[in-house]
Amino acid sequence: MARHGVYVLGVAAVLLLGISTVSRSKGLKGREHQRASQIPSQFSPGERFAMKEALKGAIRIPTVFCQQFFPTVFKTSFIQHEVVGEYSHLLTVRGSDPSLHPYMLMAHSDVVPAPDEGWEVPPFSGLEHDGFIHGQGTLDNKNSDGLKCFAILQALELLLKRNYIPRRSFSIALGHGHNGAQKISALLQTRGVKLAFIVDEKSGGPSLILSYRIAGSEKGLINLSLQVNMTPGHSSAPPKETSISILAAAVSRLEQTPMLNMFGSGPSKMTLQELAHEFPFPANIILSNLWLFGPLVSRFMERSYITNTLVRTTMALIMFNAGVNVIPPVAQAIINMQIHPAQTVQEVLDLIKNIVADSRVQFHVLNAFDPLPVSPSDHQALGYQLLHQIIQSIFPEVSTVVPGICIGNTDSRHYANLTTGIYRFNPLYLGTGLNSRKISVQFIQNADADQEPAPHRHEL
Ligand SMILES: *[C@@H]1O[C@H](CO)[C@@H](O)[C@H](O)[C@H]1NC(C)=O
Ligand SMILES: *[C@@H]1O[C@H](CO)[C@@H](O)[C@H](O)[C@H]1NC(C)=O
């Protein structure tokens, strides 16, 4: 719990600062003078102390979003602050160059409720103990979001204090759950906003080696109810089949018939090819010759349930309700499907109905959404290239940065109408928390240093 809290803030700052390094990358042409004027992402002892104190202060109150910690952000004339749908916050930073396509950083301002047990120090104390700052919202797998939100704001605060004026406009969306993200997105859509890219929390899938996935896609979802209705009967004169057995057979058929292995039609094939050189012989040869070894690799990926989720639409039976001591009239099961980016909700529903092949089973979609389109990761993809460069400059131990799929769903799908480039990126995922602030500081500056890449084919 609460490890490395103060460091995490660093990542955000580097993110904001980091974008000028990208100017040296292929594909994005930077300008010399921009590099020279860059504000370093190293922090002085005084700044470190101030950031640490602010973090401790923020932990003491059960929300990380508090204007008092970011006085400069909230009094800067070119930053507009709006409260959206009561709990979400949208900050719009107007850059000096309106010709540059704006971008957005997303974080979550809601901190999950803290149970009192399980803490070495009280959750909202912000106490320093063994060199770590403890508290709800500090770095922890469960609730790193609040801290990231804090890190972005602190990075911005730091840049503004050093008189930095961004060239490229950007917004910071601090959403409160799905609802907040929906409302912010709807607001931006009514304003006709189009974004060059969005950076969201979450990482791009499980790590095999020291590589980093920037998730440029995420799976879709269906919660599907399967129901069988029969006339009720008495168990002394049982019918041949009951609603329970019909439904159980249907569910069993689904479990025995996995969805198609989609290896090769999604980002995972490219991910493996780019990682090939990281593996020892013979895996490197196999992975760099997927035209030949593709079928072998795809079967290998099916064997672990983690890599299996990368190659196909998965199914999990999550609820089964039937029977109260008589032959039940109704049996209902709910399955949850996570849809591979190369399939759609409709395709998966059709497949399910074909596999069940029993007209006594009725289907009701409880909720569903298609996978998000795969965001570009080529040399023209500004958001991807910026993240790529920053990860490599801040984490030299990370040898490879590749596109991946986000397993599970994020709030970013609510923003799909605003941009073609949504990248899920989690600096905390990289182990040492140093650096949320640092990353944000570098990111904002690097985004300024770059010229607009040539319009992408899928550009809105
Ligand atoms: C269905 O999907 C959502 C994810 O969007 C999940 O939160 C919800 O609990 C699921 N289950 C049911 C029974 O709807
Ligand atoms: C995206 O735009 C379409 C067409 O205007 C609209 O129907 C849809 O609800 C929008 N989706 C989101 C998630 O805002």
Image: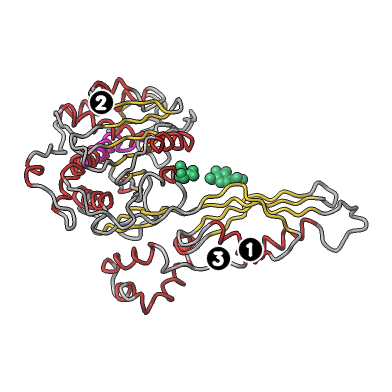
What residue did someone put label 1 on?
254
Residue at left offset 48%, top offset 35%: 179
Say whether disc 2 or disc 1 marks the residue closer to the N-terminus: 2
Asked if labels 2 and 3 touch by Cβ distance under 8 angstroms, the answer is no
Amino acid type of the residue that numbered disc 2 sits on in the rendered structure: Val
**Is the CB of the residue bearing disc 2 within 8 angstroms of ligand 2?**
no
Picture quarter with the N terminus: top left
Q: What's drawn in magenta, residue-wise?
A: 1-14
**Is the CB of the residue bearing disc 1 within 8 angstroms of ligand 1?**
no
Amino acid type of the residue that numbered disc 3 sits on in the rendered structure: Met
Indicate the quadrant where residue 74 lies.
top left
Q: Please name whichever residue, 190 or 446, is drawn nearer the observer in this view of the structure.
A: 190
Residue 410 falls within the magenta-colored stretch:
no
Residue 35: x %, y % from top left:
10, 44
Q: Residue furthest bottom?
A: 292
What residue did someone put label 3 on?
259
Amino acid type of the residue that numbered disc 1 sits on in the rendered structure: Leu
Name the magenta segment's main secondary structure: helix
In the picture, measured across the screen, residue 184 lies left or right of residue 132, that is: right
